[in-house]
Amino acid sequence: DDTTNKHVSSTSSPSFLQKLKLSLFPIPPYVLIALLPFLPTSLYLNRGYTVWFHLLSISYLFTRSPFTRKVLVLQGTGICLGWYAAIVHDWVVDGTFCHTLYRNMPGGMLEYMVIE
């Protein structure tokens, strides 16, 4: 009695998702992420605490350290809580919504996003 599954190939050919991933990312994603700090700062907001978060994220991609992952979760939670605190502060104190956040955008984005 032959118990092998005839519908499953015994050779390990790449799946559709693996082929799609290879075609979408000709450069490995961790290399692209490692290059992010070299982008001009006018393209993104990376000040203070988020600089450390981004650098630690890049180091985690290379090391896969469980300790680094825990620190990243803690930092990410702090960053999110800070954003929510800024939104609540704007709403309660000034009666506005997200003014503090969008006023701190990079200048190139601010001129297109905010009409005075």
Image (spheres, helix red, strand yellow):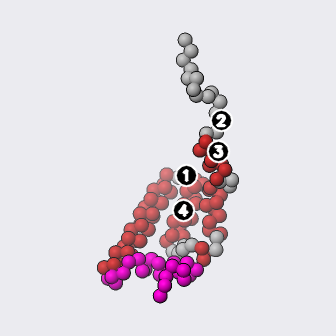
* CA gap, disc 3 and disc 4: 30 Å
Q: What is the x, y in percent for residue 30? A: 62, 56
Q: Are marks 3 and 2 in contact (CB under 8 Å)?
A: no
**At which x and y percent is residue 52?**
53, 68
Furthest toward the top, the residue is: 1
At mark 1, the secondary structure is: loop
Magenta stretch contains residue 81: no
Would you name the residue on which mark 4 appears? 56
The image's mark for residue 19 is 3
Q: How crowded is mark 1: few (under 14 residues within 10 Å), some or many (20 or more)?
A: few
Q: Which residue lies furthest to the bottom in this view?
A: 116
The disc, 4 or 2, on the residue closer to the chain's N-terminal end is 2
Label 2: element kind = loop
What residue range appears in magenta?
A: 93-116
Q: Which SS class for mark 3?
A: helix
Residue type of the residue flagged with mark 1: Arg
Whichever of labels 1 and 4 marks the residue nearer the N terminus, that label is 4
Q: Marks 3 and 1, Cα distance to the nearest angstrom?
A: 25 Å
Q: Which of disc 1 and disc 2 is earlier in sequence?
A: 2
Disc 3 residue type (three-letter) = Lys
Q: In this view, does 20 lie to the left or right of 86?
A: right
Q: Which of 2 and 64 is in front in this view?
A: 2
Which residue sits at x=60%, y=54%?
62
Q: Quick one: label 3 or label 2, which is nearer the N terminus?
A: 2
> Alpha-carbon distance for marks 2 and 1?
27 Å
Is residue 80 in sight in this rendering? yes
According to the image, label 2 marks what residue? Answer: 13
